[in-house]
Image: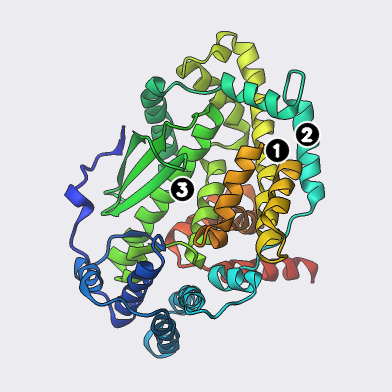
Amino acid sequence: MTAGARTPAVGGMRDVPVPDPIARDYILLALRLDQRTPGLVDGYFGPADLKARVDIEQLRGPAALRDDAVALRERLAGEVDDPARRRWLSAQLLALETQAAALAGETLPYVEHVARCFDRRPVRRPDELFAAAAEELEALVPGEGPLGDRLAAWDDAFTIAPERLGPVVDWLVERFRERARRLFGLPHDEALRVGLVRGQPWSGYNWYDGGGRSRVDLNVDLPIRAADLVRVLAHETYPGHHLEHAWKEARFVDELGRLEASILLINTPECLISKGLANLGRRFAVPPDEEAGLLAELYERAGLVAAADPVAAREAAERQVRITAARARLDEAALNAALMRHADGLDHDDVRAYLERVALMSPERAAKRLEFIEHPLWRTYVFVYSEGERLLERWLELVPPADQPARFRRLLLEQLTPGAIAEEIEAAVAGVGS
């Protein structure tokens, strides 16, 4: 399953520009910190010699890495002329400094730690939001009995058999790619391929190899439902992670020689922007007024029983759109759970009970979500999807619908931070109110 015309090179290796001293030292710092916090580096397609250098050198201590981040941030004023680039690097370096300091034993209050990592302070959601979403689901999901049982039966009816996935994925990805081409343009050499894998904890993942190439994996150990497939593919391909990384490589690495863009880091401000962008991109891949029609056609292409009656399929698709939206609101209870566990100090069992009661999670799902929330790496990361989408959605909707593709394209071609986005929102709101 492929999109685009380029055949990936073996290992994704290619020539890259020589980094300037700031970008070089930023890359070295991130690679060294990744040795202390495995998983921090989500992708690297920069100079191979820098990776080789870090691989063979002696491990650097957390306190030294913290000091390196501080020193590098202090150099920005004298070595980086472009204000947007300087601000982006400063925010990234503050996140790396914060994580190195935590490894060195310098603990901050949880919310402060998260805010320094993402250039954005997490916001607790009111429980009324979840109660309203649960009430909506009670009315939307057909059948009798407990809501969880009815949701499970509904999901089963729209689960795609693994052997039917190939043609459906190709159709969706090409549809999303063509829409992205018209709205945002495509780098001339981008390409991706989609594979089916097993034995992974996630539903889908984008592995960006550089050179405009991505590998997107879908996990067939988990049930792949029609609506989830649309969401995951838009998130991972067009106009989500693949398009973002391909454009930023073309713009910053190839055109401007800003090699800091050749390393992708989680638990940093760029991660919050990237995840929010990928979530928000779904509205461009599938405009809201086309979503039910797309799902109905997907039911047919996937050979689902629901497609046997076109009228019933359309009605089911329209219902699914509303169910998906309500469930997305309900899932935000995980943000509150993270704050309850790490900021409020509630114990494990109390937070798990909260997820079961408020988010309507099964005991097994609540336990799995809490495992993620308590993990040393993911306890910070848990906020990026919802907080990123919430911030960027508000920013996007400050302009008329006709201007929103151009505004979204800025996310693909500029080094924007959550703080800069928030300032644009505040300025716009103040302008309206004045």
User: Depth check: 46 or 286 in front?
Assistant: 46
**Amino acid type of disc 2?**
Glu
The residue that label 3 is drawn on is 240
Label 2, label 3: how many angstroms apart (C-alpha)?
29 Å
**Amino acid type of disc 3?**
Gly
Residue 127 visible here: yes
Label 1, label 3: how many angstroms apart (C-alpha)?
22 Å
Instruction: Give the structural element (helix, strand or loop) at label 2.
Output: helix
Foreground mark, 1 or 3? Answer: 1
The residue that label 2 is drawn on is 136
Of label 2 and label 3, which has the lower sequence position? 2
Where, quadrant-wise, is the N terminus in this rendering? top left
Q: Are marks 2 and 1 in contact (CB under 8 Å)?
A: yes
The residue that label 1 is drawn on is 326
Q: Is residue 78 left or right of residue 107?
A: left
User: Depth check: 372 or 240 in front?
Assistant: 372
